[in-house]
Each structure stands twice: as C-alpha cells, then as structure tokens.
Amino acid sequence: MKKIYILMALLATFAISCSKPSNDPTPKPDPKPDDEQPTPEPEPEPDQYVAPITVDGDFSDWDKLDASKVVVASCAENALKTGLKVLKVFVDEMYMFVYFEYDDAAIPDKSDVQGHVYFDADNDETTGGCANQWTPGCIEYMGEGHFFRNDAISIFDPSLSFWTGEPQKEGWEWEDVVASGSGLFNGTGKDGKYEMAMLFEMFPGQPVPLGDTFGFGMDIQQAWSSVGILPNADSNDDNPNGKSKLLTVKRP
C-alpha cells in the first residue's frame, strides 16, 4: 500500500511540474539581414494629367467629349460675315480648347490670314470695351495672331493685349501684356477646320485676372478686315451689324 501512495505522489509532482509555465522565453529566430527583408509596396503615384484634346489636326477627339460641357456658337443664317461656320469651346482644369470651322472661300489669299481671340475676363458687362463686333463692348483682353502664312497653316501663338480705351466703346486701343510666340496658345488645322489650346496658368493675372466665368469670341480676317465673327446674330433692322453677346465659358 505504501508503494501505491509513493507512486501517486510522484505522479502528482510530475503533473504540477508539467503545468508550470517556463521561465525561459521561446527562442525567436534571428532577424533577417536588411537585404533579405521584404520590400515595402511603393506608394501609388498621383494620377497624371492627360489632355482630353491633342492639338494635332486630328479632330476626332472632339467627338468623345461630354457634349453638355462644350459651349457652341454656330453662324447665324442671316449674318453679315459668314467666314466662320462654327465655334466650340471646352475647358478643364488646365486648358481652354477651341475648335472652329471656316469657309475657305472667305479667305482666298492665304499668304497672311489674321485672327483674334477676345476675353471678357471678369464676366462684367460694365467693364472693358471694344464694342466693334459684339454687344455690349466688355472685352478686357485681345489676342492677335495668324492662322495662315505663306499659303500654309500657321501655329496660332498670338500676342495678348489689354483694353485701355473707354468702357463699352468701339475702337482699337490696346496695351501689349504678352508677346507673340510666348506659348500661351498652340494651334493647327486642315481641311477647313482648326483647333487650338490655351494654357490657363500662362494667362496674365494683371491688370485683370481671368475669372472662373468669362466671355469669349473670335474672328478670322482677310487683309486685316474680319470676314468671319463668332458668336454672331442675324442682321436686321434692329441689329444691322448682326452683333451678339460673347459666349459664356465656365471653368470647372
């Protein structure tokens, strides 16, 4: 019987010793050298800007735009000067893109075909001037360049001038603020069509910044006289010169 008690005591002691936690921590593997550590995943790069329009004379990308975001002016049926058929403007956070179609017969001499772009920069009809082709005369900036030179399509990269005449008056009173060839605009075309782009960050902030909403119009000229103007209106007794308001363009 004594042997049984001794055996039971030994078993109890063994069970207690097995249930006690070990004071020694479990050995951990040595850390891997730096060249064996897993390479961390790179941070995703921010989305890069991709222009919706490429100024290259291929106009198919205009058909891919959201039509609700394209501002359009078509030549009025009874306009006096019909050298421009249609004008389209699309803007994003970087550029203003412009597309137009012209009547080739209106510019038979392509040795020197001029054109202008006009901006009501502050969208305020009481400021600016140059009421020559639109009403009211509220234009702050005018860009002057060429669409053809030496019988070939020319890159439209105009100078930019600021109106210095009286508000809402006709005339041609400008002060240069950006020289031609600055890269403010880029343009090209073919087969009666032309497209161009203006980089917003290059537009001068003084004397008047270009607002989030602004007015826009353009002309095409032969021998420094307009043969096409857009937007325009029908010529009638109340409006013999067929003047309209400028297009309203809103930046996103």
Image (tube, rainbow, N blue to C red):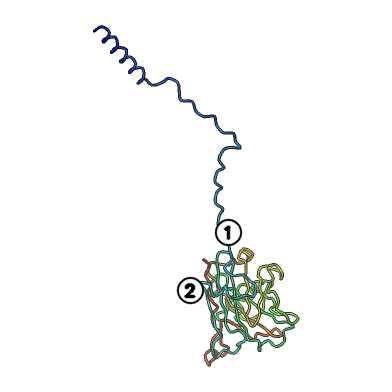
Q: Secondary structure at mark 1?
A: loop
Q: Position of residue 52 (x, y in %)?
A: 57, 68
Give amino acid for label 2. Ser
| Residue 164 visible within the image | no
Residue 206 vs 145, above or below: the answer is above
Position of 40 with respect to 182 (left or right) is: left
Labels 1 and 2: the sequence-earlier one: 1
Please state which of the two labelled residues, at mark 1 or mark 2, is closer to the viewer.
1
Give amino acid for label 1. Gln
Q: Are marks 1 and 2 in contact (CB under 8 Å)?
A: no
Residue 169 vs 201, above or below: the answer is below
Q: Position of residue 150 (x, y in %)?
A: 76, 81
Frontmost residue, 41 versus 57: 41
| Residue 55 visible within the image | yes
For the view shown, which residue lies furthest in the top direction? Answer: 2
Figure quadrant of the N terminus:
top left
Frontmost residue, 170 versus 201: 201
Q: Position of residue 207 (x, y in %)?
A: 62, 66
Return the mark for residue 180.
none
Tell me the distance, in whole angstroms, between the alpha carbons under discs 1 and 2.
24 Å
Frontmost residue, 246 versus 7: 7
Q: Residue at x 58, y 70 (%)?
A: 121
Q: Position of residue 198 (x, y in %)?
A: 62, 69
Q: Residue at x 55, y 66 (%)?
A: 92
Residue under label 2, please give it. 68
For the view shown, which residue lies furthest in the bottom direction? Answer: 237
Within-10-Å neighbours for mark 2: few <14, some 14–19, many 20+: few
Frontmost residue, 22 versus 252: 22
Return the mark for residue 48.
1
Query: Which image quadrant is residue 209 in?
Result: bottom right
